[in-house]
Each structure stands twice: as C-alpha cells, then as structure tokens.
Image (tube, grey):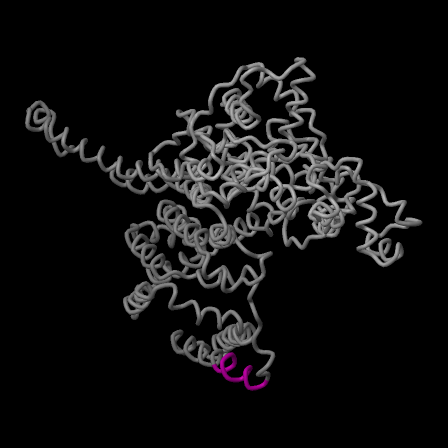
Amino acid sequence: MPIISEIGKRSASVRILYALIYLVLLIGSVTMIYPLMLMLSGSVKSDADSWSIKPYPEFWLDDLILFQKYTESKYNVQSQDAQQTWCRPVMSWRTIEKPDVVPPELISAYRSWRSGIPVDQRVVGNLAGRGVLPKNLRSFRNYMSNKYHDDLNAYNMAANQLCSSWSNVRPSMEIIGRYRNRNLPEDFRQVLIQWRATIPADGLIVSGARGYYVMTYLYGIYTSRIEAYNQAHGTSYKSYGEIPLPSRVPAESGIARRDWTDFVRNEIRLNFITLDSSLEAAFRKFVRRQYSSIEVFNKEHSTSLSGFDAIPFPSRIDDAPYLRQDFEGFIKSEADCPIEAIGICSADELFLEFLAEKNGRIPEGYPGLGAVAAATDWEDCMANKSAVRWEFTKRNYVQVLDYLTMHGNGLLNTFIYCALAILTSLVVNPLAAYALSRFRLPGTYKILLFCMATMAFPGEVTMIPGFLLLKRFPLWPIITGVVVTIIIFLVLEKCLPKWKENLRALLSLSAGLFAGAVLVPYLSPENGTISLLNTFAALVLPGVANGYFIFLLKGFFDSMPKELYEAADIDGASEWTKFWMLTMNLSKPILAVIALGAFTQAYSAFMMALIIIPDQKMWTIMVWIFQLQGQSHQSVVYASLVIAAIPTFIIFVLCQNVIMKGIVVPTEK
C-alpha cells in the first residue's frame, strides 16, 4: 500500500512534496556524478591541460588547447625543443597561441622537404612524456618486441641496456653533448634507423642551428629581455625570433662576430658544421700532433690506416663519425682552424636551398624556418583533429592496460584469487552460519559476539600476525589434529555409544588439540610448519571465514520457516540435503551480497597482498596499479582507477538483480 493515496496526490502540497523529494534525489545524484565526471575528465589530461578542472575534456571542443597538447606531446614535453624549433619563446604549454599565418605554398614546400629528410638524420617526436606513454614510444616498444621476438634479453644485449621489463624500454639518447652517442652499438643504430622509417613525417622534429643559437645561447648571455641584446649590439629587434644566424662568420669585428665564433666553436652540434677543403692539410697536421704515431691513432679509433696522410678529411663530421673527438678539438683550435673557414649547414640552410631550387628564388618576406615549422604544426594538428583527439583520449588507458599486460600475470592472478575468495566465502561462511542457526548451540550468541568483535580491529592490525602465521603455517599440526579428532570420535562412538555426544566430541577435540599443538611440534620442531608465502593459499586463507558474513547469514537462516525443515525431516532428507538443496537455494539474495563483499575485499586488497606475496609473478592487479601510480602522471592514476573500477561495477550489476529479489519478492508474498 503506497504511503500517499491517489486522492492525496491531487493536492498541491503533496505535489510540492513530490517535487522536493525529486529535487533532493537529483541533487544527490549530481553530487555523485560530478566527481565521477571530474575523474573521467582528469584521466585524459597531461601537463598541458592539467590546470583545468572541468567535468569534460576541454580539448574535445577547444582547438587551441588541443594544439597545446599536440605540441607538448610532439616535442617530448620539452618546451625548449619547441622554442628552438619555432624560434619563439615557449614559457609553458598553456601560454602557446595560434602561430602566425604563413603562405600555404611555404607549408606545402616544408612538408615536401620534411618528408625527404634522410632517415638516419630524423629526430622523432611523441617519444617521451612525463609519466605518460606517447604513441611513438608505444610504436618503438612494439617494433622492438617484434624485432627481437619478444625476447627482452636479446633486446638488452643488442641495445646495450639493462631493462627489467618491456615497460622500461625507451630509445637510447643518440645525441650526447654535441654529437652521437658513441656507446650505441652500430648494429642497433641501424635498427633504430629502420624504425624511424616507419614514423610519418608529421611526427618528426625539425630544428636548425638558428633556434638553438637564438633561444638558448643568446638567452643564456643576454637573458630573456631583448632590450639587453639590442643595447649590447646596437640593434632594434622586437624579439629574439628576428635575430638571424649567418651561415658564415660576420665580416665586421664586434660583439656579433664574437658571439658567432664562440657559438660555433663551443656550442653548435657538430653535424651542423662544414669545413672548407682548404683546411685538409691543417686538419692532418693537427691530428699528427695529437698522436705520437699512426699505431696509437689506429688503436684509439679501431682503424688500420697506413699513415697520417691516409686519414680522411671530414668536411662534415658525418663523413667520418669516428673522428668526432679530433674534429671537435680541431674547430676549437684558433691557430689551426680559422673561423672564416667554418660554415653552418643545418635545417635552416637546407630548407632555403630547397626553396631556391624549387622556385628559382627565395620567396619575398620569408619568415624563417621557425615560423614555417610552427604554422605547419598547427595545420598538421587541425588536419587530423579527430585522430589527435582520439589519441589523447585513449593514451592513458592504453598505458595502464599495456603496463598490466606486460608485468607478470596480474590479470590471471587476480581472476584466480577473486574466484577462490568467492568460492570459499560461499562455502565456509554458510556452513558456519547454518550450524549456529539450526543446532541452537548454548554458546551461539557468545560465538556471534566473538565474530562481530573481529570487525573492531582494522586490517592493518592483523597484517604482521597474519604474515608471521603464513610464513610459518602449521600445516602438519593442523592435519594431524583433524585426523586424530576424527579417529578418536569414531572410536568413542563405536566403543562407548552410551556416552553423551557432547562428551565424546569434547574428548576427541582435546585429543586432536594435544596431538596437533603439543605432540607434533615436540617430535618435529623444524618440519612442523611450511611457508605459504607467494601462494594463492596465502591470499585466500586470511579471508575464508568472515565474522560479519557469518552474522548476516545466521540472521537470514533464522528467518526461514521451520515448517520447511520439518517437512524435509518427514521426507527423510539428510542434513547436507537440507543445507544444500533447501537453505542455499532460498538464500541466493544474501549469497549474492556475500559474493559481492568477498569479491570487493579480494579485488581491492593490495597492501596485504604486497606483504605476503614478494614474488612479482604472483602480484595481483591492485599491486601493479599501486606500483604504476608511483611512477606515472596524475592523469594516468585517474585512468588506472577508472579501469580498476570496471570489474567491480560488472560484478555489482550481475549481483544486483539477485539482491533485489531478496527485497521485492518477500514483500510481494
């Protein structure tokens, strides 16, 4: 019968009451949904938009924020790389604005030139992140995993690395200081080149010497204030991006010439330098002074040259990479290498040559490579908005799933653990509750009080005792005690049938306790215990019997009609039949509650699992997620929480209908 009658519903005051009730429910739902939406929104963020606190990802709707995230990812979360490429300040990702418009012909020419960059000279973007997993890093791991047939040891040997898992695999730094990493094996460098060939051209970072000169070298000398530079040089530039970098040293003596000379001799990457052929004799003379004999030179460089005259002259260091140390020392020597004989040939100069060759001239008002690169980045992002948005939406979730699948057997271990936890809870707890409900033991309520008292202790209190017990688990004393108890009880039942059953049970239990607790430890003090650490038994046993579950089940069993059991007795049903066929069948709603509680406890446990399972091969999902959260971006943490909540949600939905039957059906009856 409803609380409010049909006639009462027609009253204005009742309708207002209804409206207030629905309003309260609506507000309550918002207080639950809004935090969930914040977490879902936060799970797809990165450094570029982590400052935003909105219940939806802003990059879904705002192209500028999408471009900021695109830039952050492409330039490997290194703002200095972006500002060196664009030749303009990038203080933070959120301060990036839409680049200045450049003619479409320049963007088209830049794309054509960019796609023709030799593979061995390409610098790949989307390859590093602060706690996130960009797409090209995923591509690198997948490529290397396939290349070395998923053999991590083979990869480590080839790459000269010591990665403990595929999740730790990252490309080696190929540029250290001013040139290549000499510790990178040549065979593996060829593998890297093969992988780079699979990366689309829009994923490449193209930066020349001018960006580094203007945005790093001059910044370090004259600070970020262009006024300081103008005052020192007598110029009137509005920004550092307007400052040119000549390919040859300025003819006029002065501070500009000094800056250029110092930059080229000591800072610029060696592969951006070209030497005039007139320096060939001077270079060999310089090398001859560095080594006492050609044998020493050959030993140092792993070569077999016949004499110093056979040493090749590297007009560019890429012609003879093994001469890196000699090349760098030579260009630093003012006596041997005149600054007028050194030139710069980086991406800035190469693109100008490409434009001149394609158009017959350099376009008027050419804004520089930096402006063209920035405008092209914007066009690349806008041309693939849907794909870019989808990449940023799924990236953190892919990282979590990738981490879980590549580390141990977390998914399988969790499934087995949860299945065993549910199974044991649905068997042991109902048996204990059935005994308390059906047999009306004198100490029933004392036992229930003891069961409920266990809830007063936090789980952390039992961690150390539980660990010690599982480390030295008395398996053989328990088995011996159970066997002795059963044997003594059967013997007493056969030999002394007139004794009261309670007395026989007490004597049998006393004998079992003596055998298990005293006799076995005395006879075999060392072999009486075993270690259950790193086993599923260590995970399952501490939660097999739950005082709260027993209390709930006992109350539910007490509510069942006695007439059902009396009818079963008349039909000659055994106690097991009454328990299994009658009680358990009628207890599905409360059993669903027990199953849901057991699953939740097992699935969410990580601290105890971490303590009693030191072996990473036995870790569960929650332990791995805990490890992941310590080394990932906050957005990845949110994504891991969303993924971790999905199994619990599914189990709750499956149990919901069964639980509702326990509420609705008895009311209907």
Residue placed most toward the observer, 170 or 296 = 296
Could you say which quadrant of the image residue 351 lies in? top right
Q: Is residue 99 magenta?
A: no
Q: Residue at x 42, y 43 (%)?
A: 638
Relative to 87, 645 lies left or right: left
The single residue placed furthest to the bottom in the displayed view is 522
Residue range (magenta): 514-523
Judging depth in this view, the residue of 582 and 571 nearest the camera is 582
Q: Position of residue 235 (x, y in %)?
A: 47, 32
Q: How many marks?
A: 0
* Rendered residue at 58%/72% (across/down): 530
Can the viewer see residue 282?
A: yes
Of residues 183 and 10, the one drawn nearer to the viewer in this rendering: 183
Inspect this view and state whether residue 45 appears: no
Q: Position of residue 287 (x, y in %)?
A: 81, 50
The residue drawn where x is 43% and y is 67% is 463
Q: Position of residue 335 (x, y in %)?
A: 73, 48
